[in-house]
Amino acid sequence: MLLCGINVGMQETVDNVLKEEERAREAVRNAREEASEKTQKAEEESSRIVEDARREAQDRIREMQSQAQQKAQEEFEAARKRAQEEAEELQRKKAERIETIADEVVEYLTTPAYQREE
């Protein structure tokens, strides 16, 4: 009889060990699933962050390009205005010089030779 009791007790112990082993397997499975879900969420979040950063960088680049183009246009307009002003000044000086030379030529031609200072 004692042997039967030992066998029953042993069977219960084996059953308990098998149940615990199954619970441990289930816990490991759950932990793996949870880890997999967390990994997937982390990858999705990482991708979203990278995409947001990429968009932000592109927006900044577009803004910088726009500012650079605006500045270049302003500098071009200023340089063109300065060149126009310089050209007008040179034209004015040239016209004055031509008028002065023309006056000298007219005076030379209209002054009798004996009155000229040469």
Image (cartoon, helix red, strand yellow):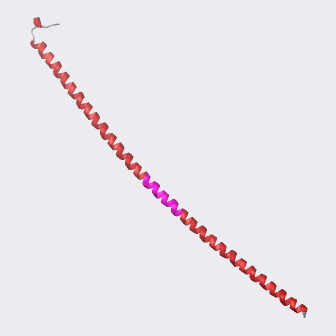
Residue 92 location (% of width, % of height)? 20, 28
- Residue placed at 15% from the left, 16% from the top? 104
The image quadrant where one finds the N terminus is bottom right
On the picture, is 113 further left or further right than 39? left
Residue 75 location (% of width, % of height)? 34, 40
Quarter of the rendering containing residue 31: bottom right
- The correct choice, above or below, for 113 with respect to 5 in the image is above
Residue 11 location (% of width, % of height)? 82, 87
The image quadrant where one finds the C terminus is top left
Quarter of the rendering containing residue 25: bottom right
* Region of the chain picked out in magenta, as a range: 47-60
- Residue placed at 41% from the left, 49% from the top? 64
Residue lying farthest to the bottom in this orientation = 1
Taken as a whole, is the magenta stretch helix, strand or loop?
Answer: helix
Quarter of the rendering containing residue 99: top left
Residue 109 location (% of width, % of height)? 11, 13
- Residue placed at 87% from the left, 91% from the top? 5
Magenta stretch holds residue 57: yes
- The correct choice, above or below, for 63 with respect to 3 in the image is above
- Residue placed at 28% from the left, 34% from the top? 83
Residue 7 versus residue 67: which sits nearer the camera? 7
How many marks the image carries: the answer is 0
